[in-house]
Image (spheres, rainbow, N blue to C red):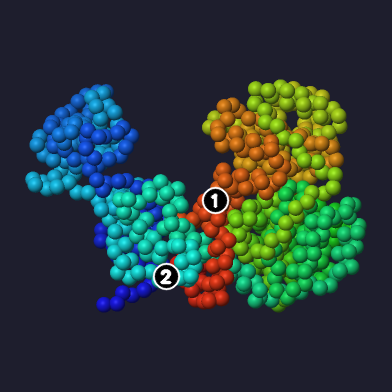
């Protein structure tokens, strides 16, 4: 009988398995298990060796072992609480099995002379070795102890589902897989070159590894079988994102070919010269905008590199061609900053940017929506409110999205889709001040062309950074006094707004009061996220105009605030923040010609990771170096903000551990695309579902 080949992503529900009813199926959903095949990708967290019996006389404390012996006695002891103590022996020594939770029936089971096999962690007790609450099985007369023929998998747990049940269900799924093996979708030449097992071999091995398997290698995720699965999963996500790029190449967009003189005039009238990097990236963008298909370009640039003015040039081009441009930012404070910058640039051209946010008053919102719909609003700045229901553009030709890593792929696709018109899709430009290591960018932004502004404006000096324990707070306060007395301004950043009993952070309110008392001669302001937009606006404006010398703030000032006269940044509880966030905050100073400084106040003692983080910031101002270290220390989800980005939670792959696979993933994707679009679609369906996670297949 020939075995049927299939693509792993069947629709067989878990209830087809023996022992799975509606109640258990509901519990399994918490482990993201919905179909039988999902069990195959629920890889073990670790493994236990139950393939051989260990003599009691050879036991070592701290090891988890399989032991068998004869029950010598079972008794109840009272040592602070009721214990059931079962003493067993195998002739080489004695071992105590200790139970804190037990019934009379359970105690009665342990009759002297019976053989018992048990498994658990060996500990050193008062009377020799013991195992607390072991897994055990009482043997019948003449029955031998059972040993596994493979290492025992320990799976992610959820309430109400025991390990034994998960192993039983996985056994059923593995039998089904053997009866109907999955289709091998990786080209044979690729598997041979990378010396990879087949998908079925890899899955079988990882769930039921042989006794001689290298457990250490499997725990680090570097076993060839794990790498085989990680490779195909990375490939699926890369293909899915690449589909968006390929789709964009087939879609129509208005080729923005007019307005060269407008662009030249705008650049000529700027109060500064563009850097070579800004000119290079501008050329990339203008070339894209002239194409009859939608631009999908990412601009990466460190804090202060001048991404916003490059985006403004793109907007000048769009408006000169008679279409609307929309600029979206993730927070109101950053969107407000953009609105001010774009207003300064565009008002001399007779263009008043429109504003749209979730906190607008109803009348102002109605006015904005009407002007967007009738086209009188040519340039629109706002938050995610721009792509919500009820917003209709007259003729949207360009979408600019700042801090791309805070928006999901779906969110920016929603804004793009809002602009679909008789001209086609709008062009899309996304920006991030969080530099992204190349391997991570390959995986996260495969749908975008990338340009990097790798040069700071002339005259900028690297920010000098030091880390100081909070017990020297008095010295830092004096440093603030000195800087402000010399005509400079300073930031004092705190993680929380109010005192918290849960987290011992310095709250902004408390710091504001402390600094007001310590520095009565200074004009001190306070800005935090709970303020109304108008209050924040007044505070930021007063600081920018020099009316406030010291601004106490929460991390709302992380991005978008540009005050060239601010040359000192104090960050409280720096040990609690991520590298990229600290780098972003540091980027608020160093925007003028004066040497700027950043002081990282920390609470002792510093943990190993916190010490590494602060050390990186002392050693470098290079955002790409910072991002790479952040990736290594925290992982991709935290660096890019997984909850906000739509960056997938990989089931097997780890973007830090498996980064070296990405170049080969790219090569393989091209091979598969040329060879068979059907195969590419099948890989995406296998890992992401029929619709694909990001785009159409």
2 and 1 marks in contact (CB < 8 Å): no
Residue 161 visible in the displayed image = no
Q: Residue 497 or 617: which is nearer the viewer?
A: 617
Q: Residue 94 or 383: which is nearer the viewer?
A: 94
The residue at the point 75 percent across, 42 percent down is: 588
Counting residues from the start of the chain, the first of labels 2 and 1 encountered is 2
Describe residue 309's horizontal placement relative to residue 411 as left or right.
Answer: right
The residue at the point 26 percent across, 48 percent down is: 51
Q: Indicate whether 41 appears above or below 558.
A: below
Q: Could you say where residue 532 lies in the image, as x and y percent from the top left?
A: 70, 43
Q: Residue 518 or 143: which is nearer the viewer?
A: 143
Give the image quarter of residue 175: bottom left
Q: Could you say where residue 600 lies in the image, as x and y percent from the top left?
A: 68, 33
Instruction: Indicate the secondary structure of the residue bearing disc 1.
Output: loop
Residue 47 visible in the displayed image = yes
Q: Indicate whether 92 appears above or below 47.
A: above
Q: Could you say where residue 143 lies in the image, as x and y percent from the top left?
A: 12, 48
In the rendered image, the quadrant that contains the N terminus is bottom left
The residue at the point 48 percent across, 70 percent down is: 189
- Count residues near mark 2 (Cα–Cα under 10 Å), then give few for <14, some for 14-19, many for 20+: some
In the rendered image, the quadrant that contains the C terminus is bottom right
C-alpha separation, residue under disc 2 versus residue under disc 1: 26 Å
Describe residue 376's horizontal placement relative to residue 101 as left or right.
Answer: right
Q: Which residue position is annotated with label 2?
A: 184
Q: Could you say where residue 224 lies in the image, as x and y percent from the top left?
A: 43, 57
Q: Which residue position is annotated with label 1?
A: 656
How many marks overall? 2
Describe residue 525's horizontal placement relative to residue 109 as left or right.
Answer: right
């Amino acid at each position: 009988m020939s075995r049927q080949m299939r693509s792993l992503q069947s629709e067989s529900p878990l209830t087809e398995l023996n022992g799975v009813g509606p109640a258990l199926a509901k519990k399994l959903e918490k482990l993201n298990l919905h179909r039988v095949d999902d069990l195959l990708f629920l890889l073990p967290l670790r493994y236990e060796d139950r393939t051989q019996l260990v003599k009691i006389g050879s036991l070592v404390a701290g090891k988890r072992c399989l032991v068998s012996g004869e029950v010598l006695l079972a008794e109840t002891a009272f040592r602070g609480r009721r214990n059931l103590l079962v003493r067993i022996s195998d002739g080489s020594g004695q071992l105590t099995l200790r139970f804190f939770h037990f019934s009379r029936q359970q105690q009665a089971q342990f009759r002297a002379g019976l053989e018992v096999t048990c498994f658990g962690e060996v500990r050193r007790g008062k009377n020799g070795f013991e195992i607390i609450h072991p897994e055990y099985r009482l043997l019948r007369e003449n029955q031998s102890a059972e040993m596994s023929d493979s290492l025992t998998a320990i799976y992610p747990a959820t309430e109400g589902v025991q390990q034994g049940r998960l192993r039983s269900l996985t056994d059923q799924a593995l039998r089904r897989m053997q009866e109907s093996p999955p289709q091998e979708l990786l080209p044979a030449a690729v598997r041979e070159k990378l010396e990879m097992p087949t998908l079925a071999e890899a899955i079988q091995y990882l769930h039921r590894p042989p006794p001689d398997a290298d457990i250490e290698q499997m725990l680090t995720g570097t076993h060839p079988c794990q790498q085989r699965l990680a490779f195909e999963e990375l490939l699926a996500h890369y293909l899915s994102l690449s589909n968006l790029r390929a789709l964009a190449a087939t879609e129509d967009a208005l080729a923005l070919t007019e307005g060269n003189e407008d662009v030249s005039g705008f650049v000529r009238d700027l109060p500064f010269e563009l850097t070579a990097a800004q000119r290079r990236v501008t050329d990339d963008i203008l070339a894209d905008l002239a194409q009859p298909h939608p631009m999908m370009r990412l601009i990466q640039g460190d804090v202060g590199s001048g991404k916003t003015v490059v985006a403004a040039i793109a907007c000048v081009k769009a408006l000169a061609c008679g279409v609307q441009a929309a600029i979206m930012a993730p927070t109101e404070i950053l969107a407000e900053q953009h609105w001010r910058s774009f207003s300064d640039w565009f008002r001399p051209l007779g263009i008043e940017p429109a504003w749209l946010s979730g906190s607008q008053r109803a009348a102002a919102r109605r006015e904005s929506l009407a002007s967007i719909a009738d086209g009188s609003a040519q340039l629109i700045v706002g938050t995610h409110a721009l792509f919500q229901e009820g917003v209709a553009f007259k003729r949207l030709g360009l979408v600019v999205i700042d801090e791309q890593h805070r928006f999901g792929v779906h969110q920016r696709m929603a804004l793009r889709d809002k602009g679909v018109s008789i001209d086609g899709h709008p062009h899309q430009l996304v920006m991030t001040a969080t530099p992204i290591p190349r391997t991570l960018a390959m995986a996260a932004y495969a749908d975008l062309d990338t340009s990097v502004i790798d040069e700071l404006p002339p005259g900028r000096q690297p920010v000098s950074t030091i880390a100081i324990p909070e017990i020297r707070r008095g010295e830092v306060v004096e440093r603030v006094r000195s800087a402000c007395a010399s005509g400079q301004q300073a930031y004092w950043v705190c993680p929380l707004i109010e005192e918290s009993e849960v987290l011992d952070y310095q709250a902004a309110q408390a710091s504001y009061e402390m600094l007001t008392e310590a520095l009565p001669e200074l004009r001190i302001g306070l800005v935090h996220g709970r303020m109304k937009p108008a209050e924040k606006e007044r505070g930021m404006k007063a600081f920018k105009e020099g009316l406030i010398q010291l601004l106490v703030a929460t991390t709302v000032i992380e991005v978008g605030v540009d005050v060239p006269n601010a040359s000192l940044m104090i960050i409280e509880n720096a040990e609690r923040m991520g590298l990229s966030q600290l780098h972003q905050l540091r980027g608020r100073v160093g925007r003028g010609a004066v040497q700027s400084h950043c002081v990282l106040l920390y609470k002792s003692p510093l943990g190993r990771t916190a010490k590494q983080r602060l050390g990186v910031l002392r050693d470098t101002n290079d955002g790409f170096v910072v991002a790479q270290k952040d990736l290594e220390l925290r992982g991709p989800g935290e660096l890019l903000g997984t909850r906000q980005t739509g960056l997938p939670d990989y089931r097997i792959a780890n973007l830090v551990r498996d980064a070296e696979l990405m170049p080969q993933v790219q090569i393989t994707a091209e091979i598969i695309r040329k060879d068979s679009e059907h195969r590419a679609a099948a890989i995406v369906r296998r890992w992401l579902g029929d619709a694909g996670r990001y785009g159409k297949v």
